[in-house]
Structures are given as structure tokens and as C-alpha cells.
Image (cartoon, helix red, strand yellow):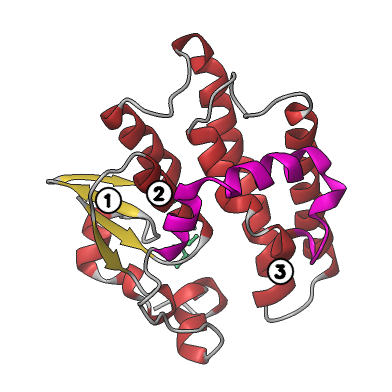
Amino acid sequence: MKFYYHPTPNPMKVALLLTEAELPFELIAVDTAKGEQHHADFRALNPNGKVPAIDDNGTRVFDSNAILLYLAEKSGKFLGNPSERGELLSWLMFIATGLGPFSGQSVHFQRAAPEKIAYALNRYLREAERHYEVLNNHLKGREFIVGDSYTIADIAAWAWVDRADFVLGAGRLPEYPEIQRWFTAISARPAVAQARLIGKGIEFKAQGDEASRRALYPSNYPRG
Ligand SMILES: N[C@@H](CCC(=O)N[C@@H](CS)C(=O)NCC(=O)O)C(=O)O
């Protein structure tokens, strides 16, 4: 299996599941600051031009939570109790469509947008905070997000909460004590330390110059 990777939250979900499930893979770096996500051979795997993607012996899967479901079903691990399937799907979609994108946009408008736009800064930070509140309330009295076992919902949320300092502002995770407790416990899993080592020897380009802005934020430039 080929795993197309960049050290950012959505690929980190897949890195953690591959490590937890002990699935063998070949790591393929996609340097998004160099625009490699737009190359035709990568677009054939992921027409959306984003990481992560996998190529499992000719089967392509793109979009991180789809990959989590695919690999969990393939390995028969981290899907939780079948009676909790509705909960699992609900929380996976909550993360895929809410927690993740609002967190990502909050980081974008704080750190990457060419202008500081008060409305956008407030809108995305407040929506990220609201998603944190929903998760924090849900985790009261719970060890895991779904049922009483570790699932791909925990894996998906972990990769985003790992960036809480950038999403919410440095040192703010303790404002969500249930998430903090849950995050500390997941982060102590041996697979997390292993997942953090994936791609460590690879030098990815730092963002910030004109070429990387064109690669990452093409909508800021004229078409064509
Ligand atoms: N919905 C996609 C989003 C993937 C995504 O936004 N990936 C980011 C890295 S976390 C990326 O590829 N950024 C480069 C770009 O947008 O060109 C998923 O969950 O996999």
C-alpha cells in the first residue's frame, strides 16, 4: 500500500491508523508547498488534489475519513461495536465536515490569509470553539468518542486536536477539560509516538514564499 503523506492533520489521521493497525505501507511524500498535490499523477489518485490518499494495490482511496473507514474495515479494527455504527458515522462526519474544516479555516485566517479580516477571524474561530464545546460536552464521563472502545473517530479527532494551539490560540486547550483529558490519554498510546516519527527524515518545504502561496492558495491569484 502506498501512503501519500505530508505532515499535516488530515494525513496524520491515516498515519496513526496505519501504525495502530500495524498495516505495512510505503510512504510517498507529497510536498504541498511545492505544489506536488497538483501533479497529474497525484490527481489521478486524488482528483481533489489534497493529501492524504492511498493506493492499495490498485484501489485508490482519497479523503482522510474515507481512508480511515476503508482501512478499519480492511483490518477489522477500530470500528467499535456494530450496535454503535450510527454513532461512529455521526462523529466521523462531524469531524470531517465540522471540527476539521472550521479548525483549518481558523488557522488559515489567523496565520496565512494575506489580510486580517475581522469577520472571517471571528467566524472561524467561534465555529471552531463551538465544535470544541460540542465534543467537550460529549466526552463528559466517557473515555472514548464512540461506545467504550478506541475507534477511528478518536483517531480522526486526535489529529485535529493536536493542532489546538494553532486553531484556538496557544495554551487554550485546558478551556475544554474533557477534550484535554481524552487527548492526553490518546497521546500516551505507543502508536502516537510511532506515527509522529513517520516522514521525520523528509525535508518538506516551509510555507511562506510566493511559490508556496500559489501552490497552496491558488484562489488568491488570477485564474489560468
Ligand atoms: N477533506 C480532505 C481535506 C484534505 C486537506 O485539506 N489536506 C491538506 C493537508 S491537511 C492539503 O492537502 N493541503 C494542500 C492544499 O490544499 O493544496 C481530507 O479530509 O482528506
Which residue is disc 3 drawn over?
A: 109
Which residue is disc 1 drawn over?
A: 54
- Considering only vertical position in the picture, is 206 above or below 175? below
Q: Along the horizontal axis of the image, is 82 left or right of 21?
A: right
Disc 1: CA contacts within 10 A as few (<14), some (14-19) or many (>=20): many
- Discs 1, 2 touching: Cβ within 8 Å: yes
Rendering coords of residue 86 (x, y %): 53, 16
**Is residue 96 visible in the rendered structure shown here?**
no
Give the main secondary structure of the magenta stretch. helix
- Amino acid type at circle 1 is Ile
- Discs 3, 1 touching: Cβ within 8 Å: no
Residue under the point 51% across and 90% down = 210
The residue mark sitting in front, 3 or 1, is 1
* Of callouts 1 and 2, the N-terminal one: 2
The number of discs equals 3
**SS of the residue at dot 1?**
strand
Which residue is disc 2 drawn over?
A: 14
Nearest to the observer: residue 48 or residue 187: 187
Magenta span of residues: 168-197
Residue under the point 70% across and 65% down = 166
**SS of the residue at dot 3?**
helix
**Is residue 139 visible in the rendered structure shown here?**
yes
* Of callouts 3 and 1, the N-terminal one: 1
Residue 2 among magenta residues:
no
* Of callouts 3 and 2, the N-terminal one: 2
